[in-house]
Amino acid sequence: MAFTLQDYEESANSIKELRKGHELPEIAIICGSGLGGLAESLEGDVLSVNYEKIPGFVGSTAHGHAGELVFGKLSGKNVVCMKGRFHCYEGYSVHVATFPIRVFKLLGVKIVIVTNAAGGLNPDFNVGDLMLISDHYAHAGMAGLNALIGPNIDDFGPRFPAISDAYTPRLRELFAECYLTNTHLKDEKNLVVHEGVYGMVTGPCYETRVECRALLKLGCDAVGMSTVPEVVVAKHCGLEVLAVSLITNRAVLTKEPSSLDIARAKLNNEPIERKVENFANHEEVMEVANARALDLQTLVKSFLGKI
């Protein structure tokens, strides 16, 4: 069921009451798996609020997602961090998953920064690299899992918004400048930043081999289970968006060996060569996210200082 303008206003007003007498955020940061450390670096009058205390917000059940809003300052900017997002794979509707975005709009947020952990499809990407998202492909969104389905709320945006420039070019360029001028991250920490297309699947299972090959052929460089619904709603609201993926694993693209070929080899007493493959798992995702978290935080802080 879609929400009404009054639902979003109730949530925004409850947050305004909690922040009464203090500045409201101008930038919202959605922290992906293992990337909640950004919230730990907020300064000033920091306030943490559990999601369950905010009307319309729900609990975050994914491992690595704390489930709270944290208000404070980062690089001199008034910021709110979502320590954990809501996913459709948790059983939430796409409207629930994107509910906070419109609340942020009512609070006065102008820019949304979205981070996520993603699997690398592009063969040039390595674990630990970052990818600036320039575009997305979401088959689920085109097939009906679109956050804008339902009655349009004209107070937020038009019935048929254009999404072609959802990932704001000026913000991507500014982030790229911050990376290219940080010799410590580039040369000493060996951080590599790419730009590419994010493919969204609903999860919670990781993708099959053929699904990964299909996404790669469709132009996707990385794949994950979030981000697109929030970005679509943010664009509908007129918000600027910067989205960054941390490549936490490499997708398995190769075909499985033929069972018939293996059976023939066994019957003919011929040697059988089996490749050792690494399949995606959440422990690996969290390990890489934690290892690169400080580097991403450094770039985000630098980026905020230049806005």
Image (cartoon, rainbow, N blue to C red):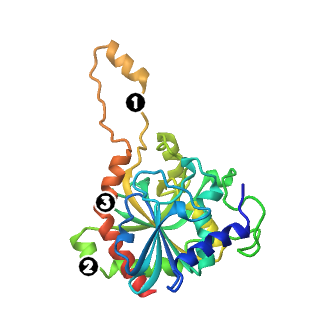
The residue at the point 29 percent across, 79 percent down is: 182
Is residue 278 rendered to the left or right of residue 32? Answer: left
**Decide: marks 2, 1 in contact (CB < 8 A)?**
no
Task: Name which residue lies at 63% across and 70% down.
Answer: 102
Left or right, residue 122 beside residue 20: left
Quarter of the figure with residue 257? top left
Residue nearer the viewer, 7 or 236: 7
Name the quadrant containing residue 128.
bottom left
Mark 2 to mark 1 CA distance (whole Å): 44 Å
Q: Are marks 2 and 3 in contact (CB under 8 Å)?
A: no
Give coordinates of residue 261: x percent, y percent.
40, 22
Q: Nearer the viewer, mark 2 or mark 3?
A: 3
Horizontal relation, residue 174 to residue 296: left or right: right
Identity, as a three-letter code, of the amino acid under mark 3: Asn
Residue 251 at x, y = what percent? 41, 48
- Considering only vertical position in the picture, is 94 above or below 132? above
Structural crowding at the residue carrying mark 3, measured as other residues with C-alpha within 10 Å and reported as few (<14), some (14–19) or many (≥20)? some
For the question of whether residue 54 can be seen, the reply is: yes
Q: Position of residue 174 (x, y in %)?
A: 44, 82
Disc 2 designates what residue? 183
Is tag 1's residue or tag 3's residue first in the polypeptide sequence?
A: 1
Using the image, determine if residue 133 lies above or below residue 275. Answer: below
Residue 21 versus residue 59 in the image, above or below: below
Disc 3: which residue: 290
The numbered disc on residue 257 is 1
